[in-house]
Image: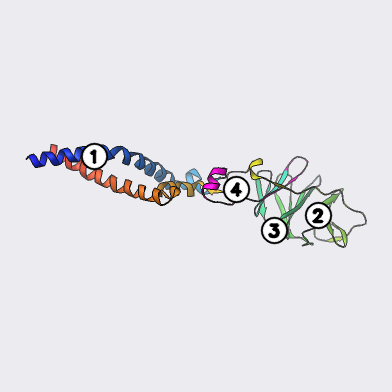
Amino acid sequence: MRITKLTNRFLLNWHRQIGLFVAILALNLSITGVLLQHTELFKLDRTYLTSSWLLNWYNYPEPNVDVVHLRQQQVIQVDDQILLGETIVGNSKGQLWGAAETEESILIASGYVLIWLTHDGEVIDVMPSPIADSRSTLARTGDQFQIWSEAGWLIADPELSDWQLASEPGELPLAVEPTDFRQIHLPSELSVGISLERLMLDLHSGRLFGPVGVVLMDLASVGLILLAISGCWLWLRRR
């Protein structure tokens, strides 16, 4: 009988001492588990974080950002994704080398791609560029777009289906400015940075804090099992 009382006292003290430690980690497990269970609802897989400290923590390379300022909007290329304002309008494996606008539309030049769209961001067409020279520039004259080449300025027809040598040079091209991504507002759904889903997974597993974090979460899981067993034992003994 004395041994049973000592055992109960030991289990009760042990139960109390590790309860708080396990409870904190269990809270993390529970909250992140619920969020991950409803990834689509909370849009965890489509929301990206670009905080400097978080990128540094993950050793994630900062995105390359180039900007062309139009009259009322700006064209932004973030790595291989192209935006008009905060609207993603296309992608390119090359670098942004020009953008121009007329009263009716906007033309964006990046790598080997030309993206033709309305001022509202609706894509009219995506086509290969007639020039693949990285020194090329894009401009406009009146309501027509022009591209500079070694042979001179090329001017497009209204449908951008044919480019011919122009008799006059285009207007002064707009500058392409390399920019720190912290200086512009990026939409949260842009796939640059660390997704909320990955952050929640790493918090849930403890991997966010390296091997030590994984061990702690393993200990928390084992602790929960032991707490459940010891709690049931103490309850049954009192019955």
Q: Secondary structure at mark 4?
A: loop
Task: Give residue 32's quadrant in the image.
Answer: top left
Residue at label 1? 15
CA–CA distance between discs 4 and 1?
47 Å
Write the residue at 53% across / 48% down. Answer: 194
Q: Earlier in the sequence, mark 4 or mark 3?
A: 3
Query: Residue 65 appears at what percent x and percent y?
Result: 67, 49
Residue annotated with mark 3: 94
Q: Residue at x 80, y 60 (%)?
A: 161
**Residue that numbered label 2 is attached to:** 137
Mark 3 burial class by Cα count in 10 Å: few <14, some 14-19, many 20+: some
- Which span of residues is magenta-colored? 51-73
**Lower position in the chain sequence, tag 4 or tag 1:** 1
List x then y, in percent, for residue 57.
51, 47
Q: Earlier in the sequence, mark 3 or mark 1?
A: 1
Q: Is residue 104 left or right of residue 77?
A: right
At label 1, the amino acid type is His
Choose mark 3 or mark 1, whichever is in front: 1
Report if residue 166 lies within the magenta region. Answer: no
Q: Are marks 4 and 1 in contact (CB under 8 Å)?
A: no
